[in-house]
């Protein structure tokens, strides 16, 4: 789609993904200079005219989270002051989504605060993929298009040709039940849930399996992200202990923080499927990691937003 009124720009968080998105729109990325002052402050300069144009700014707030978030804010302000007609913040991975409520006293609701500053900085619209908490959409005072990676992941899982009577969709905890039910509706098979108890912010304990039998079947675990991998690795062990012959793990966002690589290396997982919302450095690209591209999905959503077409039709 070649249109002189639309332009995709990218921050430094995931340039490769932004280039793929532009390619699927039959375009190239907009010209922008991104660097740092000697003291670490962000410097941004747009190197082409954007007055009156429909701008899509790609910048996941992945690690280093604070640096990428700050760069996004500075870029938004830059495009606002350059008189862009509309600025859509394309945030494939939205950091700071974990703290979406006050579950104990004297803690912030960081997801709301970050939503506010993104809006104040200049975003007229937000496009995100698989938010950690869906209610974060309501924290923005501008329209939010919340995409799901299910079309990308389901197409790949279907290529395994697993008979429905041998497939079990496994939710790694009670918080992922809705996601597991969605994937079961699309892929068929049985469903089971791991009874997970969180002992701290970084440690979890898995115990019982609730649902259909795993014996001799293929378990496919779905989650929105793999951070330290404690949840999915624990679920994989539970599946194996209950007789699963193979275990696959699917997640939209592959963060792979802290001990994740070590845990995944030692886990009974045949394949780990993630998308390219977050760049995965070579030292984290395990032999059994498969990276699917979310670029075609994001590009189609961008095209629909620009043309004022329905985005929800992508999932019908």
Image: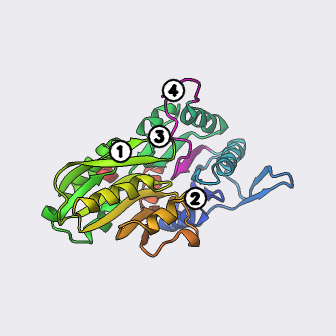
Of pointers 4 and 2, the one earlier in the residue sequence: 2
**Residue pointed to by mark 3:** 144
Query: Can you tell which of label 1 and label 3 is closer to the viewer?
Result: 1
Pick whichever, 248 or 69, lies toward us.
248
The residue positioned 77% from the left and 58% from the top of the image is: 35
**Residue pointed to by mark 4:** 104
The image shows residue 238 at horizontal and vertical percentages of 30, 56
Specify the label residue 4 is tagged with: 2
Of pointers 1 and 3, the one earlier in the residue sequence: 3
The image shows residue 154 at horizontal and vertical percentages of 30, 61
Q: How many neighbours does mark 4 have within 10 angstroms: few (below 14), some (14-19), or many (20 or more)?
A: few
Specify the label residue 196 is tagged with: 1
Check the image and report above or below for 267 versus 80.
below
User: Disc 4 and disc 3: Cα gap in Å?
Assistant: 28 Å
Q: Are marks 2 and 1 in contact (CB under 8 Å)?
A: no
Of pointers 4 and 1, the one earlier in the residue sequence: 4
Question: Under tag 1, what secondary structure?
Answer: strand
Residue 91 drawn in magenta: yes
Of pointers 3 and 2, the one earlier in the residue sequence: 2
The residue positioned 45% from the left and 41% from the top of the image is: 199
Of pointers 2 and 1, the one earlier in the residue sequence: 2
User: Disc 2 and disc 1: Cα gap in Å?
Assistant: 51 Å
Query: Can you tell which of label 3 and label 2 is closer to the viewer?
Result: 3
Q: Which residues are magenta?
A: 85-108
The image shows residue 44 at horizontal and vertical percentages of 75, 53
Q: Are marks 4 and 3 in contact (CB under 8 Å)?
A: no
Q: Are marks 3 and 2 in contact (CB under 8 Å)?
A: no
User: Disc 1 and disc 3: Cα gap in Å?
Assistant: 31 Å
């Amino acid at each position: 789609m070649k249109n002189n009124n639309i332009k995709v720009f990218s921050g430094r968080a995931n340039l490769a993904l932004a280039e793929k998105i532009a390619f699927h729109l039959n375009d190239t990325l907009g010209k922008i200079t991104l660097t740092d002052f000697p003291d670490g402050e962000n410097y941004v300069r747009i190197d082409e005219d954007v007055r009156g144009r429909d701008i899509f700014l790609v910048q996941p707030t992945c690690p280093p989270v604070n640096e990428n978030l700050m760069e996004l804010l500075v870029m938004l302000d830059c495009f606002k002051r350059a008189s862009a007609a509309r600025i859509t913040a394309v945030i494939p991975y939205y950091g700071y989504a974990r703290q979406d409520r006050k579950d104990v006293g004297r803690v912030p609701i960081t997801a709301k605060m970050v939503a506010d500053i993104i809006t104040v900085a200049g975003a007229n619209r937000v496009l995100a993929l698989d938010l950690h908490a869906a209610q974060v959409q309501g924290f923005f005072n501008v329209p939010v298009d919340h995409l799901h990676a299910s079309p990308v992941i389901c197409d790949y899982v279907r290529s395994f040709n697993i008979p429905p009577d041998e497939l079990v969709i496994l939710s790694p905890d009670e918080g992922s039940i809705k996601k597991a039910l969605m994937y079961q509706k699309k892929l068929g098979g049985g469903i089971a849930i791991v009874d997970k108890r969180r002992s701290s912010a970084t440690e979890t304990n898995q115990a019982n399996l609730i649902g259909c039998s795993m014996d001799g079947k293929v378990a496919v675990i779905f989650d929105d992200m793999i951070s330290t991998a404690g949840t999915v690795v624990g679920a994989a062990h539970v599946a194996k202990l209950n007789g699963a012959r193979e275990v696959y793990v699917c997640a939209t966002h592959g963060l792979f923080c802290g001990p994740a690589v070590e845990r995944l290396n030692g886990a009974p997982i045949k394949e780990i499927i993630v998308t390219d919302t977050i760049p995965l450095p070579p030292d984290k690209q395990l032999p059994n990691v498969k990276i699917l591209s979310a670029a075609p999905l994001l590009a189609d959503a961008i095209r629909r937003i620009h043309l004022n077409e329905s985005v929800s039709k992508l999932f019908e």
